[in-house]
Every structure is written in C-alpha cells, then in structure tokens.
Amino acid sequence: MFRTPMPPAVYFRAAVALSGRFPALAGVDLVVSKGEVVVLEGANGAGKTSLLRACAGLIPVSSGEAVVLGCDLRSDRTAVRRRVGLLGHSGALYDELTAAENVRFATCSLRSGGARSRRSRSREVSDRVSEALERVGLGGRPARTPAGRLSAGQRRRAALAVLIARDPELWLLDEPHAGLDAEARKLMGETVREAASAGATVLLASHEPEETVHLADRFVTLSGGRVTRERTCGELMGNLGEPPSGDADERARESREATGERGEATGERGEIVGERREVIGGIHVA
C-alpha cells in the first residue's frame, strides 16, 4: 500500500532572514524529519542561533521558503510559537518568582481553555510543574526558592524544567551544555533522548561534539548563514576516534528518504518582558 511521506518538521529552502540590514540567514537549505535530532555546528556568527530563532518564529524570514510544523513562517510566524520550546543562553527566569512559579507561568502561557474546568486545568499544570522540577533535581526547597537566589547551575536546571513541563513538539536548544557540571550534562543528554523517543524533534546548536555525538542523527554545519555540510553520526564518531553508531546513521538515512531528500537539502498571552527573557505566544526564551 502506498504511503504518503510524512511532512518534515522543518523545511527551509533558500531561506533568508535579516537582522537589520545584515543577512543572519543567507539562503539556508535544511530539511529535518519529525523525531530527528539534528546538531547545528559552526563558528560564532555562523547563523546557528538565528536559525533556531527563525524556527521559533522570533525573527522574520524575508525570502525563500520556511515551514515549521506545517506553519508557513513567511505568512504567519506567530502560529508556530506555542508548539516549540527554545532554550537560549540565559535562564530566561524572573528573579522575583520561585523556580516553581517560573515553570508554572511559562506552562500556563500556552494552555488553552478548552471545555475543561479551571480547577482541572490548574491541577494538570501543577502536576506537570512538580514532575518537571523533580526530574531536574529541583524538588522541595529549591522549587520554593526565588530564581534570583538559585545558583547558575540550578537556574539552567529550572530553564530545562520549563521545556519538560511545556512538552513542545520542536525543541530548540542553543548551547544547552554550557555552564553545566557533569551531572547536569548527563541530565541534559537524557532529557533530549527522552524527548526524541517520545516523538519530539530536536534542533541543537553546540560547539561540543563530544557531548552531542551520542544524541544526534545528523550534524549540520553552518557558515555565513548557509548550510555548508552535513555529516552522519558515524562520520563524526570516526573523526573523534570512536566506533560509529549504526543505529544513528540508519535513522538519519531513513529520515532523508522519508522527505524525499538525499544528502544535503538543496533542492496569546505573552509579550516581550525585557532584554534577558521573553514569553512570546507561549515560547519561553532568553
């Protein structure tokens, strides 16, 4: 029986995004299948963060094609915001709120009313918040501590709890291992694997291949706002002197075939609340 190929989670073709007059993205070609974990590589200023923010609908795509989770970013870049989660460089937390209150606020910002009672929705959110904080090791007293009094590592854990509680379809992670100790780095890796196993798609920008090589299906290199190279997990492991992972390479090959691609793809509640953090249409970002 003929099966219609599943549409990709991310489809960019000749996509251009401007930052002022500067082309932050200068003709990006990229296809990411649903459930795939793709690591973005490249020097500072290569366009990694701009690509993540474009996928989140936070910067406009001025030309080319850009479709994320079926939403055309050229026509309405706000429609996708409630379905993605962006973890930026800072913790994106309100210092005066406790860790639990920060997670609850970010989670409530995307919940629609529906037909359920307010009490039922509130109970669901409370359960999600508690589970997320326990998952990142911030249960008990840390959950009741104002974010401004948390350590840097605890703030990163709280920001990760936001994503876990929100459970987005597309995870956008910008240097997620930065500033984390060994235990927290392990937690980050486990969380990414769990999200992908549950069906989420992950785009992860990183300068640390040793931390991401066991997570990724593909590695995409950016330079000058363009995609310049794609590598499989096995190819990168070979460069690092590690035995290749056949499973990851197979997933990468299957994902490209599912979207008709071979090799490189060429072919409301919430507002900006300051320089350090934003809640925009359900996205909690730095």
Image (spheres, helix red, strand yellow):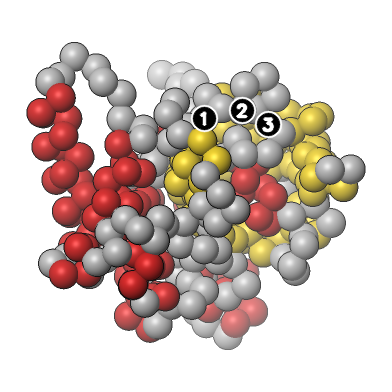
For label 1, the SS is loop
Q: Residue at x 87, y 47 (%)?
A: 22
Mark 2 residue type: Arg
Whether residue 73 sits left or right of residue 148 in the image: it is: right
Quarter the N terminus occupies: top left
Between disc 3 and disc 2, the foreground one is 2
Residue named by callout 3:
66
In the rendered structure, find residue 80 and report the number of the disc placed on it: 1
**Does residue 168 sit above or below 91 in this rendering?**
above
Q: Distance between the residues labelled 3 and 2?
A: 9 Å
Q: Residue drawn 55% across and 56% down?
A: 276
Q: How crowded is mark 3: few (under 14 residues within 10 Å), some or many (20 or more)?
A: many
**C-beta proximity under 8 Å, tags 1 and 2:** yes
- Picture coordinates of residue 11 (x, y %)? 64, 35
Q: What residue type is labelled 1?
A: Val
**Residue occupying image coordinates x 55% and y 63%:** 89
Pointer 2: what residue?
77
Q: Nearer the viewer, residue 225 or 149?
A: 149
Say which element carries label 2.
Answer: loop
Categorize mark 2 by other alpha carbons within 10 Å: few (<14), some (14-19), many (20+): many
